[in-house]
Amino acid sequence: MRKFKKYQKNLAKEGITQEQQEKLFNAKVLVMGAGSLGSNVIMNLAALGVGQIKIIDGEIIQETDFNRQLIHKYKNIGRAKVMSAKDWIQEFNPDIKVELDKTKLHELNYFNTIENYDIIVDCFDTNEAKYMLNEIAIRHNKILVHGGVRGFRGQVTTIIPNRTGCLSCAIQKPRFFKDEEFAVLSPVASVISSLQAQEVFKLITGEGELLLNKIQVFDGLKSEFKILNFAKNALCETCSNPLGF
């Protein structure tokens, strides 16, 4: 019973069941990125009681990160983000097992990072990385919870191979990626990452309706949510031909 005390508010009226909390304890989730989205996803998963979290990020903490990356401390500038994230989790919820990888993911080195994890949360900050992760998830039959933020807007969808369309079906993959830097506002990142964590919760517990073939779009300036429907594209080069990029 002591194990459940910290999750009392999860289990209270109109919350979740003890069986669902046990599923969270036994779950493993892979978080790709420990920056603006990743920081907040990690916070939410730790608070829910997800039993094992693996974090992939090859970056170090910089002063420019602090407008939106809420788990990192100023004293850790220059330190690996994954190490800072692990410290935060262990201080906040020592029951959680944390696995780290400081690899900068690319098409040739990813396999060991995704092995043994069926749910991947996309918290990367570039479109090129997001489409690469989409392709990796489809190729290896991994569930992908996509999230993206640009300025005051953000989006979330859940991609299940062989069941839904993929990111390229929803938003056509560009032929070329521009090296552009967009603003990321903390309140918008917090909203999108919370929705991503909610999708992970639904995947693990079976509770609620997932964002399947739907993108939930948030406009922070209008305080407005919209659902945009999409379908699997039979000509999609990614999910209609999963054996090759």
Image (cartoon, helix red, strand yellow):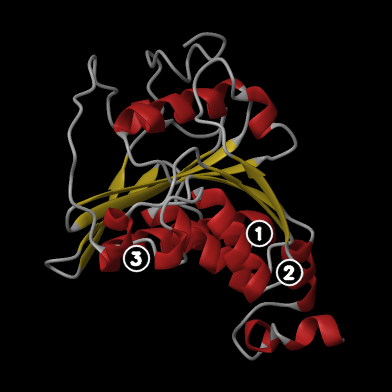
Q: Secondary structure at mark 2?
A: helix
Identify the residue at image location x=58%, y=67%. Answer: 88
Residue type at numbered disc 2? Gln
Give the quadrant of residue 219.
bottom left
Rendered location of residue 42, percent (x, y): 54, 60
**Residue bearing the label numbered 3:** 191
Q: Residues within 10 Å of mark 1 (few under 14, many from 20)?
A: few
Q: Secondary structure at mark 3?
A: helix
Left/right of residue 236 with respect to residue 58 in the rendered view: left
Quadrant for the N terminus in the image = bottom right
Which numbered disc, 1 or 2, marks the residue that appears first in the sequence? 2
3D distance between C-alphas at marks 1 and 3:
22 Å
Q: Earlier in the sequence, mark 1 or mark 3?
A: 3
Characterize the local packing of mark 2: few (<14), some (14-19) or many (20 or more) Cα atoms within 10 angstroms: some
- Taking 120 as reference, is 104 above or below it? above
Q: Position of residue 176 (x, y in %)?
A: 22, 16
- The residue under label 3 is which amino acid type? Val
| Residue furthest to the top | 244
**Residue under the image location 64 percent in, 82 percent down:** 10
- Residue that sits furthest to the right in the current view: 1
Spatial CA span between label 2 and label 3: 23 Å
Give above or below for 187 relative to 178. below
Say if residue 209 shows up in the picture: no
Residue under numbered circle 2:
20
Residue 190 x/y as whole percent: 36, 66
Q: Residue at x 65, y 33 (%)?
A: 114
x 24%, y 54%: residue? 184
The dot on residue 206 is: 1
Is residue 161 shown left or right of residue 224? right
The reply to whether callout 1 and callout 2 are in contact (CB within 8 Å) is: yes
Residue 8 lies in what quarter of the image? bottom right
